[in-house]
Structure formats: C-alpha cells, structure tokens
Amino acid sequence: MTSPGELERTLRSQLRGEVDFGAAARALTTMDASNYRRVPAGVVAPRDAGDVAAALRICADAGFPVVPRGGGTSIAGQATGVGVVLDLTRHMNALVSVDPVARTAVVQPGLVLDRLRDAVRPYGLAFGPDPSTHARCTLGGMIGNNACGAHSVAWGTTADNVTELAVTAYGGSSYRLGTGWAGAPEGLRELVAGNLAVLRTGLAGGFSRRISGYGGLDALLPERGVGVARAFCGSEGTLGVVTEAVVRLVEAPRAPVLAVLGYADESAAADAAAGLLGAGPLTVEGMARDLVPGAAAAGPLPRGDAWLFVEMRDEGAARSLVRGADAAHSLLVTDPAEQRALWRIREDAAGTATRTPDGGMAWPGWEDCAVPPARLGAYLREFRALLAAHGLRGTPYGHFGEGCVHVRIDFDLVTPAGIARFRSFSGELADLVVSHGGSLSGEHGDGQARAELLPRMYGPEVIALFGAYKDVWDPAGGMNPGMLVRPARLDENLRFAALPPGGGELSHGVARCVGVAKCRTTEVGGPGVMCPSYRATGEELHSTRGRARLLHEMLAGEVVTDGWRSREVAEALDLCLSCKGCRSDCPVGVDMAAYKAEFLHHHWSGRIRPPAHYLLGGLPRLLRTVALLRAAAPLNAAARRLPPPGLTRDRPLPPLARTPFTRWWRSRAGASSASAAGDGASSASPAFEARVRAEPGSGKGRGGESRPQGPGATAVTLWPDTFTEYLSPHTGRAAVRVLEAAGLEVTVPRGPVCCGLTYVSTGRLDRARTVLRRTLTRLEGAPDRPVVVLEPSCAAALRTDLPALLPDDPRAHRLAAAVRTFAEALEQYAPHWRPPRLDRPVAGQTHCHQHAVLGDAADRRLRERAGLTGELSGGCCGLAGNFGFEPGHHAVSVACAREQLLPSLDAARDAARDSGPAILADGFSCRTQIAQLSPYRAHHLAELLADGLPIEGPADSP
C-alpha cells in the first residue's frame, strides 16, 4: 500500500504544478458549501491537461481516489474527498479562445463564469447559465453539477450549452467528447445498445430541471443524437476530469426590461409562474417578503407579500406580459442601474435564507428540489406542511418558472435526535418531490446529500444502469467515490461532528461559514469590502472562507493539530486586515476580525509578542507619554531617519502633532470653564457661550446655519480618539466648529479615554478589557449624552467590541448605545441645520468599519445636502491601522489600495471639469494611505464642512 508521503513524492517528481500534502492545504479543502466534511490526503494544482493525466495515473497506481474541485461552492458535498483533491482554479483557469461568429468559446475548467461573461460581452454575447455564484463559480464546476441559474427558462442548463469536452479518466486515459460515438470510452456504445428500453422508459417524461443522478443519459439515445458530451454533464466528478470545454454562447438582449409582479403570498406567485412561460420570458424568479429587508420591501418593490421577477427582451414584451398577468401590483423597470438594484435584492435572498427570523442558522441539504412548473404551487403548500410537521423552518425562493425551489432549513445537525429528524424529513421530502413528478436536484447535483435517495426517484433498472455507466468510465471506482453511485449515507460525514461540544462563540462562528465563497469574488465596483487580502493574493488561504476552514480544523484537531499555537492558522490570519468587511458582506456574517483577535489572544498567551504588538497595539499609551513629555518634534525627527524596530521600512510613520487635540481644547475652553466642569467632561467653550449670549433668540447665524437657541441646546460629547488626539487634531478642531455652528454644545472628556481598538486588533484582549473598564470609570460622572466619534474604527469598536468584551457591565452597553458618527449626530440632534453648500464632486473611500458596522446612510444624506456629488470607493484602503506598518504586509497593503481606491481618485480627477474633486476619507488610515501612495490629500467630512463655514472671530481661536 502506497503511503501518502510516497504518493506526494511521486507527484512532486512528475508534475509541473504544485503538490501540497501539508496540514493547511488539506484543511482548506475538507469542506465545500455543504453540510459535509471529508479529509483529503493532499491537494494538487495541475498546470495543464498533461499534469491532470499524470496525476490521475499516479493516483490510480497508488490506489488513492481523486476529486476535481473548482470554486468549492457545491452544496451537496461533491467537492470534498478523502484522496487527492485536484484544484483546477489555480492554473487551469484560462479563456482559451472566443469565436463570436460561431458563438462559441473554448474554456478551461477553472475559469470563473464572470470572467467568461466579461470577455464575451463586447460581442453582444453571453453564456446562458448564470447561477447566483457567478462571481466565483467555475465552468468546470458548472459542467460537473449541470448548473442552471436564473436564465435557464430561456437558455437551458449547462448541458444545453456545451458542445465538446476534453476529459481525462482515472488512470490517465483522455477522451474528446461531442456528438456521436467518436472519442467515447470503450464499452459505452454497447451499454447504451443493451439498455435502450430502460433509457426510453425509465428516464422518460422528464422536464428541464431533472438533474438528479446521471439524468442526462437519455441524451445517448440515437433519436437524441448520441450526445456524449451532454450526457457527461452533471456527473459531479464521478466519471473523469474535464480539462477543456467548448461552450455555446447566446445573443444577449440589448435592452432587457424587468417586470416585478406582486402577489398576495408565495403560493399565489408559484401558481402564476407557469402561466407566464408562454410570453417567452428570459427569467421567472420568485421570492417572498420574509427574505427581503424591510427597507427594500417598502421601497423599490411593488406592493405584495411575494414577487415574481420576470425579465423580458424588450419593453413592449414586458408591457404585454404585465397586462396579461394576474398580479395584484406590478413594477416595470427599464433603467439598468435600477434593474441591478432589484436583482441584488433577489440574489441577496441566498444569504438571507441562511438565517431564521430569530437569528438562528439554516442549512443546505434540500437546497434545490424541482417539480414541473404547473405543480409548483401545490408542491409548495405541501412542502410547508411537511416542514411544520417536523417542527422545521425554511423559506423557499428560486426559479419558479422552472419549478426549482431553493430553501435552507434549520436542521439540528449536531445532536442524535436532530440528525435522526434530518434523516426522516429527507426521506419524506424525497417522496413528496417524486409524487409531484419532480427531481431531487434541480441544478446543484445530488452529492452525498441526496444520492442515497435516488432509488425513490428512479426504478431499480435505472439505478443499475447508473452503476454500469459509472463502471464504463471508472472501473476502479477512484473518481469521487461515495457520490451518485454506491453513495454514502446522507447523515454520514457531517461537518459539525468534528467540532468539540461547547466550543464557544468561535466554534459557532466558524461553523456558520457555509462556504458559498462570496469572499472569493474579485468583482470590482459597488460598496462591498470583502475580502481585500484574497483580492490581493488570489489564495484560498487568505479568503474569509479559507480562514474559517482553518479555524474549524484547528478546533477539530484532526488535521491542524497544534491548537492555538497553530502556525497554519497564524499564517492565514497574518494577512487578514481586520477590515470587518465579512461582518456585513458575508451572507452569514462571519466576523473574521473578531476571530483573529481571539486567536492572537490565545496564540501569544504567555509568550513574548512581536514588537509591532507592543508599539502599535499599545499606541494610545505610547502617544500619551510622548505628549506628556512634549516630545513629538524629536520623535518625528528620529522616525524620519530610522523607523522603530519591528515595523516595516517600506513606509514612513505619520508625524505626530505638536499640540494634541485636548490640549488645544483646554486652552480654548479656558481655565474657568474647565474648573467648573465637575461631571467628568469639559464644558462648552467660551466661544459657544458667547454665541449663546449674543444671539439669545434669533436662531440663525451667518450663512443661514442654525445657531444655538440658548442654554437648552443639545450637549454632545466629542470623543478624543487616539488618531484625532495625537495625529490629526485639526480634524477634531474642524468637528468642533461644525457641531457648534449646528447649534450643539460640545463637551470633551476631561481625562484620557480609549476605545481599546489597537489592543483588540493585536489580540491583547485582557489589556483591552482593562483599558475599557478604566475608560468607563472616567466617564461615570458624566451625564448621559450622545458621544460623537470622528474615527470610524473607534466608533465601531465602541459600538460592537466594547459590549462584546464587557458583556456583564451595563456601562459598556450604555456607552455603545450612545455612540454616533459625525453625520449621525448632526442628522439626529441638529435636523434643521443647513450645512454650507460646497457644490463640488467628491471621491474617496468609505471606511471599512463604517461600511460593516456603522452604516453610511447619514453620511450620504449629509453630503447630498452639502452639494458633494459622486460615490465613494468600495474595497479597502489597505493600510488598516497597524496592518500596513507591520513587516511583510506592504505589498498586500499597496495592492489593496491600487485595486479600487487609487483608480477611483484618478478617475474622479479626470472627470472633474474645473477644480479637482474633494477627496474624502473619514478614517485616519485611509487618509494616510492616500497621502503616501498618491498626489492627493484626503479630508474628513468635518474638515470639508468647516472649510465652507464663514470665518469665525477671534473668540474661536485658542
């Protein structure tokens, strides 16, 4: 018996691609987007078809099974394996050629669907199948699962759009499949000839979404044209490995129109869907209100509790459809941007469906059953009743025009009783689907989740034929065993079984990662952030999913065996920017920044940490000492000559301000005012009090802005965060000026306060708790009032990290609830104030933590009122606090900035006609990155507004 070590050495000696049998590579591929987990022996990333053939020959000789893997987004377990995983995304990801005249393209299996769509769009063409994972699923995976997507009503499944396949079988034999027997494996023609009756009767009466098993075998019938390539589609890696494919392209509609039809409930929408097919729609998608955020349901969608999204080729066809539909309400959308916004609501349902209304998790397993469209309404009513009978919850949605229903269900896949219920429900649901003439899988394949139940759908003769078909291609049984033919039980290999019981929040958090791999998208544009390190490196190790998988395996202890000391996990998390983008952009809210902080806390417990953890992690205390010693100038001079040890030499340190913000505030407020404040905060400045006395009843000041109404004006506490205090005090001064101009009384805490952010980001959680308790104690004497935090990362830390670190301290929850961003404070407490009109374009970046935790709706409204036009960049600036100053991070830091932020600044400059755009970045890290990597200087929104105010008198000077 060949050992894994011997196999690894042989593969390394004969392959050009990477061979990795290490713990990290294996841990990254134990799971896909399903409920299942299988531990592979190793991972191979072949360079080309020759490497694939060599790997399959060597593995067959050694007796190791093989599973091909694309994006790893399969939801039935078919992209996991116990032998060698072939990662076809690293090298075999090319678009080989496009023939716009013949409307075909030649693709490699690891090509992501969106790359193909982007490449053929200039020719007015598209690839018809379009699963919701189009930004990360691969063509090879789509062929393996016979993927469909929203447009299959018009353009069919992947099998309908494949003309030729280059396939390599277990053992290394290669085949070129198309139409006809040429290139087919030996014995296939004879198998078909001997089973014509079974093929004609056992697979008869199918409909477009009959994907289960080798359901496309009837394509081999002579009257069906002997479609050998078509029959291969949907084989889920159990027959061989696709190394190249010729796919058919379709003409993309030039100006499609979206009709959104509102119905009283989901069943009414389902009943109506089949009746729309005669109008020739491109899509007929369905969803109900419980999958739509409240704001979206109240805004762009028409009235109703369920909707059909129907895309038509042109406006005339769309209007005709609406007139003939029995919808209670409708909406016709012609603007492409508005269409994208509505489609985003529909696509986001895939993420919303992973959560129950009370915040619990719902799991795949019965994600995509399909029935004939005319049966869909009746099926859904019975399906809902079956869920209720088992005490389960799930919200169906999906491709109603083809009777394909997606749903995630809140199975208990941990306890024996829950697993037993999962099993019994699965059998009853399979019977229900079959009773309606349906298919257990409508587009995602059966894998381990449903293959055991295929005999309920097909008779014994068909099941026997499936086994014989598998044996023609794979007589040794080495291709993805346990799937489709001679399958594993559906309740075996559940991924939750590997986690220790009572694993705490980290265990629950990593288990939440269902593997849909939205973090692997490289799509540019829009407000999204996740996942900047993956975008920079392209390595699964640096995706949110990859890190969650490694943490999962660390807790399981089978593959990653070093626990909290794991080098593999430390390496994966080292390039995590703690941007928190995954907290909002991940469909299930995986918060890798929090998991990284906890890992670093344990990883370095009892050990000397890297110097950056002390220098940057302890930045608030260090800078406070420098300020007390009034040593900013000599320290700046020293840093220019030689950066501190333990930090990168690739970028300069930002200079310290000579006068910290609170020192300026105290000198401005005056000794008498400061001594009168006995409530834990400095009182308002003399300038504010003088303004109140000078304008006791007017309520209006220069420029039309609201002025204080007198002593009853709302008091807000301006939080002197570390960055504003020591590095950017001019931002604090600008904020004071704007807040006072808006009629607010500004106070500042008397002693040093800290949100603990730098300690959290370096995993010094005990120190963070100490700092936060001290801060809360300093604030105890202050009356309750809004706390305005200018630095988004500090505001996010106070709002989320503070109550998480001190869950039993009511003071922590009160402070978290009091936190407001600059724009939120102005909108909430000075609603009638009119900001100065700046009337110029704006460019820059929304801070990652603001995007993920705080939201920027108030900022958008404030910018609009001030005449600041244009959108800010998505993505991440790449500096991310301490990240960009730590050794080994500079290249990734710069790559993040160059992906979206810096190009957006150049584009805004080029588009500006007169003066250049205002560059806006509320985060100090974002402003620093822009200053260091571009010719631009960015400003906080408070600075831009302050510059637009009338010049103040001498009373406002310190």
Image: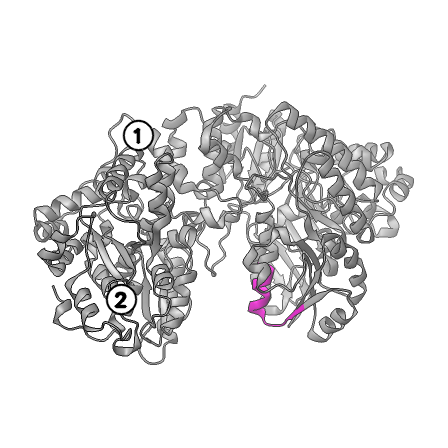
Q: Between residues 801 and 713, which one lies in front from this camera angle?
A: 713
Label 1 close to label 2 by CB (< 8 Å): no
Tell me the kind of residue under disc 1: Trp
Q: Between residues 111 and 71, which one lies in front from this camera angle?
A: 71
Looking at the picture, how far across and down is residue 17, in whole percent? 50, 40
Residue 488, can we see it?
Answer: no
Is residue 757 rendered to the left or right of residue 675? right
Is residue 409 rendered to the left or right of residue 269? left
Tell me the kind of residue under disc 2: Val
Relative height, residue 521 to residue 60 (above, below): below
Q: Between residues 335 and 410, which one lies in front from this camera angle?
A: 410
Q: Between residues 65 and 792, which one lies in front from this camera angle?
A: 792
Callout in the foreground (1, 2): 2
Q: Which residue is mark 1?
A: 604
Label 1 environment density (alpha carbons within 10 Å; few <14, some 14–19, many ≥20): some
Name, please, the residue furthest toward the bottom: 914
Q: Which residue is mark 2?
A: 738
- Residue 336 within the segment the image draws in magenta: yes
Q: Residue at x 37, y 42 (%)?
A: 813
Q: Secondary structure at mark 1?
A: loop
Residue 566, can we see it?
Answer: yes
The answer to which quarter of the image holds residue 686 is bottom left
Q: Which residues are magenta?
A: 331-344
Whole-number angstrom distance, CA of label 1 to CA of label 2: 44 Å
Looking at the picture, how far across and down is residue 678, in whole percent? 17, 48
